[in-house]
Amino acid sequence: MSNTLTIRLPKDILAWLRDISERTGVPVGRIVRDQLESAKSETGKQRFMQHAGTFSGPRNLSSRKGYSRR
């Protein structure tokens, strides 16, 4: 089943798409679909998460000393 989506693109993005299409021989529609699929699979994988757990510094950053339970 095929669905059609019509969007308006700025001239610079359209020129970029056409340039990529001509250089690679891949139709513009396929480039857009591939990019959308890529964005869909990236959902929940924010770039900042690559740094999770990589902090180097003091173990306890709390400014309220004496309020922690041990």
Image (cartoon, rainbow, N blue to C red):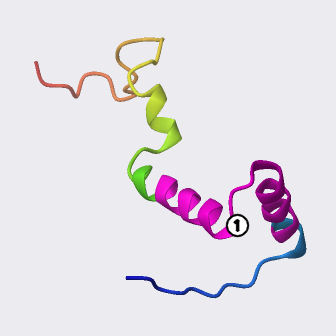
Image quadrant holding the N terminus, namely bottom left
- 21 displayed left or right of 54: right
Kindly indicate the quadrant of the structure image that contains residue 52: top left
Query: Which residue corresponds to mark 1?
Result: 28
In this rendered view, identify the residue nearer to me: 36 or 31. 31
Local packing at callout 1 (Cα closer than 10 Å; few below 14, some 14-19, many 20+) is some
Three-letter residue code for mark 1: Val
Q: Position of residue 7 (x, y in %)?
A: 67, 84
Looking at the picture, does residue 51 appear above or below residue 54? below
Residue at 89% in and 74% down = 11
Q: Which residues are magenta?
A: 14-39
Looking at the picture, does residue 69 appear above or below residue 2? above
In this rendered view, identify the residue nearer to me: 28 or 6. 28
Chief secondary structure of the magenta portion: helix
Looking at the picture, does residue 27 appear above or below residue 63? below
In this rendered view, identify the residue nearer to me: 49 or 15. 15
Residue at 22% in and 28% down = 67
In this rendered view, identify the residue nearer to me: 52 or 14. 14
Residue at 40% in and 22% down = 61
